[in-house]
Image (tube, coloured by chain):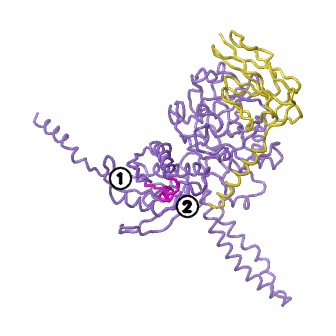
Chain colours: A yellow, B purple
């Protein structure tokens, strides 16, 4: 039992130290992430194509570790602040585009919604400093 | 009329006699080891934590196992159960959950329960229970080591063939104020623990034996060197013989030829559930005795086929609820572990090499990685291993229920490894497979823990879904379905109906898998 506890403890310590190291990669200062469509304040009927724009950086497949490139994540109605030291979460409000997609078909229930883009590195961590778009608000009729 | 009145009066006369009813019951007594020491360190904190454990873990576990909490004392509790099996299961659940809760704490803050279980004829009152049987349970609890469950011989006789655990006999013990000695057994929740204790004893034996043989061998060597024509046989036997007890006493390595088979290890109770066999957690003797060609197969549970309603109205992706018929199939009892995965990686059949604890679930694998694993497993074992279909997964996860969660419509803490559902520290995640209660089919981690890939391509709802339980593979296969939700998702994701998608070739740190097998 004692040995097992020691192993657990050391594994925990190792994990903590890994987590401390596994932070995002540096990003160019002039990188800009933005929505091509829709724009802030748009009113939309039904489903729509959401298109992502990125300047001064490249889009690549998740897992590919190239300099100055990453992949898109779309945050829908997310209010919690982004944790720069954790991988971008994966759930129904954090959509991943790890295959290098730059657009997606979105269907949302009627009402106000916020959209925001976050660029992730090969391991889904935000860059340093985080490359995020403005948070836009749209209305679905 | 007179007769009827008489009957009535005799019935109404009954309750006073029933005020001290006797009943045969399994009594579970638990208390916290070193409670006064904990109170001395941090009185308020300890009190709060104990209350919280009672509320979140002990009470729901007792209710969940059809027992009744009779009373709580400052540092302990007494509960009664109709079924000894349920009583011991409940005790094991409490102990296993406490390990998880303590893991994030420094050792001197650990709250550890000692639990004793006894079967006895007792007097039950509304808020207390009396009798020899209770006293013996509390005495057993008193001699138990922290974190352990001790049971009496009476309980052991009832459960030995019904509960898949190891039991270590501690012999007859004389306990305070009880005339006859009590036969005591220690419960080893998983057979791996049983192997460990046995291994420890074995090691001591082997050590002594080797020492003995070493002495003989050196004697023989001395004899050979000084007498050139001496016997050589002694030399050869010296290094070999210490291995013999090791090989003989290790559990047989090839027990998993067929899914519905039980492990014939001595004094480990055989499983009663169909297809149940022993978990393979951290059995140190295994690699030494395993044939190099044999592949460690996952623990598989054979499920009978049946019809069920797949989906729900809780989320647009889960609509419409529809009837699906499932053919018999087997599914792994746990998610695939790092150890199991790395056998594939070692065989160069899986491109992804996992790091992390051996008994943690595999994570950070893509759907394509998962397919590599099942292809390798099927090839190495010549059996039809594959990913489960989405319908099979949900059928297995529901465990015969149609409620929101497999345990009911309300979320209960401590039932699944999800965000804000447990006390497990982030650094400990993903915690080892099988740390939470199994569902009614005996499957662990079906909901929470790690997301699990299934065979199906992603479809945004069930319009046009097959109803024969097969995988739905037509359409856009750039993304596949993940099930179960992970430790990073909230409780709603742990629902059996919950579904989500992810890019086929992309790895993410909460995505793992389990395997299925066609009969």
Residue B127 versus residue B208: which sits nearer the camera? B127
Q: CA distance from mark 2 to mark 1?
A: 27 Å
The quarter in which the N terminus of chain B is drawn is: top left
Q: Which residue is mark 2?
A: B267
Quarter-of-image position of residue B12: top left
Q: For residue B32: magenta?
A: yes
Give SS at disc 1: strand
User: Which is nearer the eye, B468 or B287?
Assistant: B287
At 48% across and 68% down in the image, what residue appears? B171
Left or right: B431, with B135 as reference point? right
Binning the other alpha carbons within 10 Å of mark 1 as few (below 14), some (14 to 19) or many (20 upward) gives some
- Find the residue positioned furthest to the bottom: B227
Compared with B400, B251 (above or below) is below
Which residue in the structure is indicated by mark 1?
A: B24
Name the foreground residue: A63 vs A38: A38
Subunit ID for the residue under disc 1 = B
B461 is higher (above) or lower (below) than B403:
above
- Residue B208: image quadrant is bottom right
B475 to B111, vertically: above or below: above
- Region of the chain picked out in magenta, as a range: B29-42
Residue most toward the left? B2
Magenta region includes residue B360: no
Image x and y of residue B317, in percent: 64, 23
Residue at 66% of width from left, 69% of height from top?
B203
Where residue B475 sits: x, y (%)?
75, 22
């Amino acid at each position: 039992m004692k040995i097992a506890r020691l192993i657990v403890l050391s594994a925990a310590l190792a994990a903590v130290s890994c987590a401390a190291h596994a932070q995002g990669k540096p990003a160019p200062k002039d990188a800009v992430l933005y929505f091509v469509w829709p724009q802030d304040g748009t009113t939309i009927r039904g489903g729509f194509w959401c298109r992502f724009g990125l300047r001064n950086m490249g889009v690549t497949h998740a897992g590919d570790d190239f300099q100055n490139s990453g992949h898109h994540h779309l945050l829908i109605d997310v209010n919690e602040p982004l944790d720069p030291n954790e991988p971008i979460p994966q759930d129904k409000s954090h959509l991943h585009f790890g295959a290098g997609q730059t657009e997606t078909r979105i269907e949302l229930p009627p009402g106000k919604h916020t959209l925001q883009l976050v660029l992730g590195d090969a391991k889904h961590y935000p860059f340093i400093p985080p490359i995020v778009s403005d948070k836009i608000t749209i209305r679905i009729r | 009329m007179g007769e009827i009145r008489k009957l009535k009066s005799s019935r109404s006369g009954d309750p006073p006699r029933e005020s001290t009813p006797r009943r045969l019951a399994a009594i579970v007594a638990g208390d916290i080891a070193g409670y006064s020491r904990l109170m001395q360190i941090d009185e308020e904190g300890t009190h709060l934590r104990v209350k919280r454990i009672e509320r979140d873990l002990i009470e729901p576990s007792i209710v969940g196992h059809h027992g009744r909490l009779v009373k709580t004392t400052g540092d302990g509790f007494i509960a009664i159960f109709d079924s000894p099996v349920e009583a011991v299961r409940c005790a094991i659940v409490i102990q296993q959950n406490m390990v998880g809760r303590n893991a994030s704490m420094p050792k001197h803050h650990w709250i550890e329960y000692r639990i004793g279980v006894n079967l006895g004829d007792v007097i039950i009152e509304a808020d207390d229970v009396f009798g020899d049987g209770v006293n013996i349970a509390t005495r057993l609890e008193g001699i138990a080591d922290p974190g352990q469950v001790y049971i009496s011989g009476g309980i052991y006789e009832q459960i030995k063939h019904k509960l898949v655990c190891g039991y270590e006999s501690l012999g007859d013990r004389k306990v305070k104020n009880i005339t006859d000695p009590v036969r005591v057994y220690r419960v080893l929740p998983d057979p791996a623990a049983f192997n460990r204790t046995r291994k420890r004893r074995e090691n001591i034996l082997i050590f002594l034996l080797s020492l003995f043989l070493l002495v003989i061998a050196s004697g023989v060597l001395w004899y050979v060197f000084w007498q050139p024509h001496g016997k050589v046989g002694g030399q050869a036997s010296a290094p070999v013989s210490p291995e013999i007890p090791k090989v003989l006493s290790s559990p047989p390595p090839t027990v998993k030829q067929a899914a519905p088979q039980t492990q014939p290890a001595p004094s480990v109770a055989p499983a009663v559930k169909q297809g149940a066999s022993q978990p393979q957690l951290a059995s140190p003797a295994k690699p030494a005795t395993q044939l190099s060609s044999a592949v460690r197969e996952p623990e598989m549970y054979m499920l009978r086929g049946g019809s069920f309603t797949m989906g729900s109205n809780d989320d647009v992706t889960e609509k419409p609820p529809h009837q699906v018929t499932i053919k018999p199939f087997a599914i792994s009892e746990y998610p695939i572990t790092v150890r199991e995965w790395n056998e594939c990686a070692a065989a160069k059949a899986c491109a992804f090499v996992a790091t992390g604890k051996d008994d943690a679930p595999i994570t950070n694998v893509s759907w394509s990685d998962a397919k590599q694993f099942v292809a390798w497993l099927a090839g190495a074992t010549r059996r039809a291993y594959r990913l489960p279909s989405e319908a099979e997964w949900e059928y297995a996860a529901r465990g015969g229920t149609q409620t929101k969660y497999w345990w009911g419509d309300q979320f209960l803490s401590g039932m699944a490894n999800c965000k804000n559902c447990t006390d497990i520290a982030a650094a400990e995640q993903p915690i080892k497979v099988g740390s939470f209660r199994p569902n009614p089919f005996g499957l662990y981690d079906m909901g929470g823990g790690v997301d699990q890939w299934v065979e199906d391509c992603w479809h945004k709802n069930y319009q046009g879904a097959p109803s024969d339980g097969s995988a739905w593979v037509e359409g856009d296969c750039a993304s596949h379905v993940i099930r179960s939700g992970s430790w990073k998702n909230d409780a709603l994701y742990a629902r059996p109906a919950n579904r989500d998608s992810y890019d086929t070739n992309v790895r993410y740190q909460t995505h793992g898998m389990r395997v299925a097998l066609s009969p």
